[in-house]
Image (cartoon, rainbow, N blue to C red):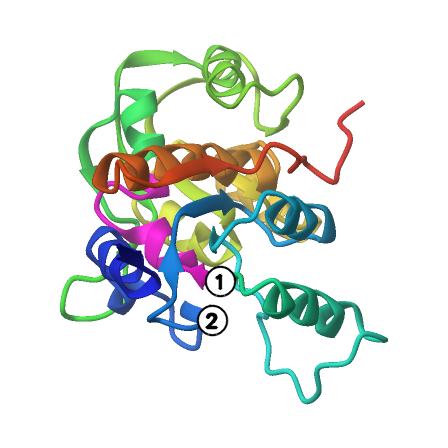
Amino acid sequence: MVTVSDVVAFMQEVAPLEYAAKDDNVGLLLGDPAGEVARVMTALTLSPDVAEEAVEAGVDLVVVHHPFPYRPVMRVITADPVGRLIWRLAGARIAVYSPHTAWDSARGGINDQWAEALGLSNVRPLAELRPDGISAGRWGWLPQTCTLSELVERVKAFVSAQQVGLVGEPDRMVQKVGVACGSGAELLPAAIEAGCEVLISGEMNYHRCLQCKSAGLGLILVGHFASERFAMEHLAKMIARRFPQLKVWASTVEKDPIVWC
């Protein structure tokens, strides 16, 4: 028999919680550690449609990247959207675990997967979070220089995106690349300090984009969803390999809430 705590222990090997950003709400957020597990689903976000998929499929544990709930909840009532989801999941005895920034920064985690997909060499962290070596973001060198537009095409192919946002001249030659999945604004100063020629991230606000332009740093924005969702597919495969007796899959209904036209 596999229990919730067995899967939690594996997740904490894959993405140790000490790798998480300070005050991030990571770990087992809902459920009974001793509960039996037969079906596990991964997802980026526990939206209502993802939660309903879990309930209808008889899932025992959802490993969701973004914490749910993210902030403290004062009451659990169905009149509130967050309370309604908690009530629905608890009623179906579905446990919820979130690795969030621990999975971003872990060895083999989301940013490392980006670096591997791009073929970066000499990969290093963009920022040291603590003196004990816990780090965030990555930067490294492409196998050879290419134009920003050529790199854009490689990025689009990796995340199956039709469109991305670009700051910088498309014909500019680049080789030193930084990656910061999700919302990468906090790592922008580190990318500039490291001398990156381009930073790949999920999203950034207008003023940060202007900061990139002023600093001469190219910026490729793929959207928050696309920058991280692929790693939840990868995580489902990792859990399935570790626990072959379980049925494990990534949510089949989850989609980017933004339609790229």
* Residue drawn at the location 25% of the way across and 59% of the way down: 6
User: Which residue lies most toward the bottom here?
Assistant: 74
Q: Earlier in the sequence, mark 2 or mark 1?
A: 2
* Residue drawn at the location 52% of the way across and 63% of the way down: 67
Mark 2, secondary structure of its residue: loop
Task: Tell me: residue 155, above or below residue 229.
Answer: above
Quadrant position of the C terminus in the picture: top right
Q: Position of residue 134 (x, y in %)?
A: 22, 62
Contact, mark 2 vs mark 1 (Cβ under 8 Å) = yes
Amino acid type, residue under disc 2 in the picture: Gly
Residue under label 2, please give it.
Answer: 31
What range of the chain is rendered magenta?
95-111
* Residue drawn at the location 39% of the way across and 31% of the way down: 197
Nearer to me, 196 or 162: 162
| Tag in front: 2 or 1 | 2
Task: Tell me: residue 201, above or below residue 131.
Answer: above
Nearer to me, 194 or 109: 109
Q: CA distance from mark 2 to mark 1?
A: 7 Å
User: Which residue lies most toward the right here?
Assistant: 79
Quadrant position of the N terminus in the picture: bottom left
Is the residue marked by circle 1 packed among few (<14), some (14-19), or many (20+) residues within 10 Å? Answer: many
